[in-house]
Image: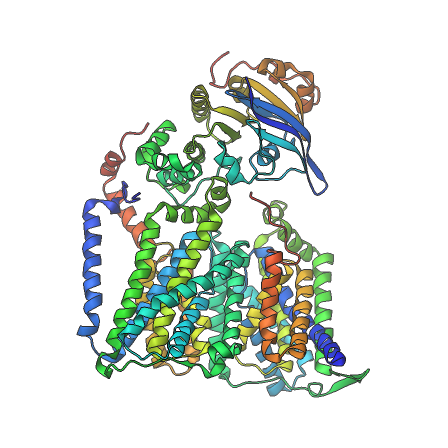
Amino acid sequence: MTAVLEVNDIKKSFGGLQALAGCSFSVKEGSITGLIGPNGSGKTTMFNVITGYETSDSGSVKFRGKDVTGMQPGGVCRLGVGRTFQLTRVFGRLNLLENIQVGSRGVPKEKRKEMYSLERRRELLEFVGLTHLAHEKAGALSYGQRKLVELATILAQEPKVILLDEPAGGINPTLIGQMATRIKELNSRGVTFLVVEHNMEFVMGLCDEIAVMERGAVIAVGKPEDIRNDARVLDAYLGGAVGDYATPTTNSEGERA
Amino acid sequence: MGTEIAKAIVGGVLTGGVYALMAAGLTLIFGVMEIINIAQGALVVVGAYLSFVLQVHLHIDPFIGLIFTMPIMFVLGVTIEWGFIRKLKTQNRTALSILVTYAIAIVLEGILTMIFSTNLKTIDAWYVEKSLHVFGFYLPYVYLFGFALAAGLLLALYIFLYRTRSGQSIRAAVQNRTGAELIGININRVSALTFGVGVAVTAGGGMIFGATNSFNPNSSYDLISRLLVIIVLGGLGSIGGSLIAAIMALVIEDVTAVVWSPVWASTMFFAVLIVVLIVRPNGLFGQKATRAQ
Amino acid sequence: MSLQETADPLAKPIYANLRRSVTVVALIAAIAFPFVFSNPAVTSIAMFTLLYLGAASTWNMFCGFTGYMALGNAVFYGSGAYFFANLTTHLNLNGGVGLFALVPLAGIFAGLVALPVGWIALRTRRHTFVVITIAMFFIFQLLAYNLTALTNGSAGMQVPSPIWGAKTYNTYFYLASLVVALIAIGLAWLVRRSSFGLELLAIRDDEDRAVGLGVHTTKIKLLTFVLTGAVTGMCGAVYAYYLGSVYPPFAFEAIFDVTIALMAFLGGLGTVTGPIIGALLIEPAQQWLTLKFTNGGIALIMFGALFLIVIRYMPEGIVTSLAQLIRKRMRMKAPALADAQQGASS
């Protein structure tokens, strides 16, 4: 499988703080790749650099071989990369259909009319299961529902790669399961995912491959089972103690393994 | 020509100091509360009238009168904050605060017009007409005293902000409002305090303004326009920035009056802002805008 | 793309028809007004109301939709006024209906002025934006005093007076103001319904995210700002023609911006009908106040106090608050109906 996203030796510091210290990894096309690491390891900063919300001090980001380092967020999005935010962002005073409509702006001109259409927007709402709230203001929805709206909005642009920043954060277990189902569904349609998450069950059960960050650099890459038992990873998280992370008994669907 | 320019520079520095004092209060309020107090100009005029009344009716020297006017203005500031600003909902806060303080300015102007009418007044004292003769320059005493007062009050402000607990609370709130709240700083109290202090300094500024200019309730417009220019020029929230900006802008204005024409001097004052903003959209010392959140 | 398709209780066909009929009736009433109430004092107030209505509507089109608070639109009002005065003076034109054709030109000029002003102002954060618009206002007011070659300074400029009789004088201006007001409202309405308008609203809610989604925020902000400037300029031109003269403190009046802002807020920021209601309420009141109270102080206090009351108790504005109230009542009355309309949950 080719790498749809390549991050090479990215360095980024904020004043005296080195957030990213030569971070490198790649995301294979068609995969669901996880990006995990303890708090402060630089995951969200990495997302920001990839999607253009921050500029790196050095290093490169390539999307499908094309160098997108330092590109503005609008440009990155137009290339087919969508992202969600750790603190879910929606257009609060617009209703759901309108939220999705704003998302259609990033679509190339030829396809825009089709993307703006009411049917298309309803389709997306149905995919996230919010058709019954189509005319509600996004700001009035619950946190979990807003997460789904955020997802639907970026889906409006038919992204080829979606970066999810803590999709399972702050929502109830049922919704977490639904989120995982939707990600798998989209993945089966060919969308690549890069997921930052702290919920280990979610990540382990969902991802084909996992990259682990610690203090601004990637320390391990591999399949979930390998990462689970990797000494460096355990060390980074737990300081050496072998805990429940070694063998989870339930997967991300909440079912017994 | 050389002496003319030198005089203009000195004059600019002296008046700049006074404007810096008034602007410091304004930028401090913004830094802590993220609101722009449009009423600052009107409050300066209120301060001027207070000093005027004390001087004319009670024959109290304006500088000494500050002992009374500053606390009064402090209370006025706290009242405004508590009565109008605090009640603003967080959504669209800055925009609403601008309109609210603009409305307050209008009300203040109305009250002053009713009490004092639009006749021009000025504050009198022995030093208003006299000057210090040094190195061939005539430095009006009132400007010197005014500058000294401004310097003194700014120093006091600095000490307050950097050496007292309340001051530290204010600075913490400037840096990170939520963070400050989380470590137990009472944001309401800090806001009221900041607003009070920011307005109290206008008592000093108002007094000097009243002594060096003839004023009436309408003077607030010109004042607030200048103060706004200064705080944006210096970078919103930066007291040091507003100090430098005030002196810079006033010096440029005074020098323009000498070198080009007095008619264009005021326009130049505003033009400086535009020129700087084209190059540095966040002012001289404003925070660099991050790309996105 | 219509945004009207909605399960919103207020969008049922019966209400759409109601809105349409009200609009038609209002339009007819507005046109007939000066012929029915021909008292010059009344038509004069009505004319100013329409001009402010236009200025407030177009102000709201930019500020209400994007959330950027511009307090310097008097720049465009005055620019339009002075352009009109200059053109009519230099071309040695005579007063008459034909001069109204120059009003759109004044609008174009004001729009051109709005281009650099907007470009400079919109590069900054929202807080700084407000200050720049205020600074621009003072710069232009000063220019009006100082660029005597163009503006005649404080001596002001004269505009050719039309030779209509005193009885019908106001009628022409009233109708011209009505046209300008309709242009302003029409433009705001078109923008509101379009996806362009939707993106402006998105900017208001979360500009950075809109940028991240590929919205050309700078372009659309600037475009809207220029349109607002142009319409405001037309208002200024009509005003100049009506008054017969243009002076710096009146063409560039500090309280102009606060007034139109108040109208938009009172009526409902971000709505199309809001500024209309606001202007209809405030402008006649303001005119009456200035006539009644010769001591300017009281008028100022009342004006400022009104503003404070509105912002404190009805920051959403009349139209929005009313709509919210009606929707709440309706949803309470027929919850079963509402559920049926919204369809099965997934």
Vertical order, C172 against B282 (above or below): below
Relative vertical location of residue A244 with respect to residue B245 in this rendering, above or below: above
Left or right of C108 on screen, residue C26 = left
Residue B189 makes an appearance in the image: no
Going by the image, does C170 lie left or right of B47?
Answer: left
C112 shown above or below B52: above
Q: Residue drawn 57% across and 81% down?
A: B215
Considering only vertical position in the picture, is A243 above or below C323?
Answer: above
Q: In the picture, which quadrant includes the N terminus of chain B?
A: bottom right
Q: Nearer the viewer, residue B281 or A99?
A: B281
Looking at the image, which residue sits at the far right?
B135
- What residue occupies the far front of the structure in this picture? C91
Q: How is the image coloured?
A: rainbow
Q: Nearer the viewer, residue C40 or A56?
A: A56
Q: Position of residue B115 (x, y in %)?
A: 49, 82
Q: Residue at x 38, y 56 (%)?
A: C61
Q: Is residue A113 visible?
A: yes
Q: Quadrant of residue C103?
A: bottom left
Tell me where residue B183 appears, x and y as whole percent. Answer: 63, 45
Residue C6 placement, left or right of A15:
left
State the image coordinates of residue C264 (x, y, percent, origin top left).
Answer: 37, 61
Q: Is residue C30 left or right of residue C219?
A: left
Q: How many marks are shown on the rendered structure?
A: 0
Q: Nearer the viewer, residue A4 or B244?
A: A4
In percent of the image, x 39 and y 74: which residue is there? C87
Quadrant housing the C terminus of chain B? top right
Single out the residue that lies furthest toward the top: A257
Residue B64 placement: quadrant:
bottom right
Image coordinates of residue B86 in percent, x first then y, are 51, 58
